[in-house]
Amino acid sequence: MRPILTSLALSLSLLLVACGGDPDATPAGDAATPAQAAADEAGAAPDALPEEAPMPSGDFRVVAVELGTELDEEGRVPRPQDVFTTVDTIHAAVVGVGSSPGLTLSARWLLEDGTQVAKAGQSLVPDAPTVTTFSITQPEPWPAGTYRVEIAINDRVVETRSFNVQ
């Protein structure tokens, strides 16, 4: 009987290795997610992890983000661009479609390293296509470099646009 058990154990081990399994690993249902592992290391309870902000009900979505130095009468950017001078006022026209009983649309302007330059938000109750504009300017020239603007619905980033200041 012993040769049969040894043969069976060897076969199971080979099957686990062939399938990518580790015979000494814990079952998949017991594995911690990276966030849970970080919470465990920090001594936090798993249920203390921050949750993402809820998306609004309805079918509202962002379909375009236009960057430029001027806006037309509809709030759109007539000549989109991604390179600006150090003294430009920079506008982001965010085009949305769909409806929602309420949401917050926001823009967060960041340096290349992630340092926040500015943030603004607007509460909306859209029921038709909308154009929401966000603008940044400053009294001193912008430092040259790469920037980005993150557009979020209820603090969830849905679009990102990079641009350069020269």
Image: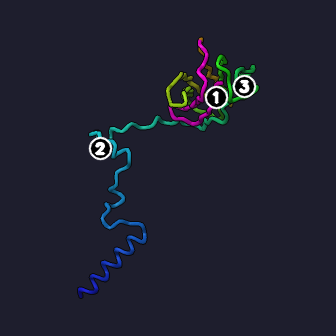
Q: Which one is earlier in the sequence, the residue at label 2 or at label 3? A: 2
Mark 2 vs mark 1: give the one in front: 1
Q: Quadrant of the C terminus?
A: top right
Kind of element beneath mark 3? loop
C-alpha gap between disc 2 and disc 1: 41 Å
Kind of element beneath mark 1? strand
Q: Quadrant of residue 25?
A: bottom left
Circle 1 residue: 164
Query: Any mark on residue 77, and which?
Result: 3
Q: Inspect the image, locate mark 2, and give the three-letter code of the amino acid beneath it.
A: Asp
Residue shown at the point (59%, 34%) measured from the top left: 160
User: Badge 3, how many Cα within 10 Å: few under 14, some, many 20+?
Assistant: many
Q: Inspect the image, locate mark 1, and give the three-letter code of the amino acid beneath it.
A: Asn
Query: Any mark on residue 106, and which?
Result: none
Q: Is residue 165 above or below residue 28?
A: above
Q: Inspect the image, locate mark 3, and give the three-letter code of the amino acid beneath it.
A: Val
Q: Which one is earlier in the sequence, the residue at label 2 or at label 1? A: 2
Span colored in magenta: 140-166
Question: Pointer 2 and pointer 3: residues touching (CB < 8 Å)?
Answer: no
User: Badge 1, how many Cα within 10 Å: few under 14, some, many 20+?
Assistant: some
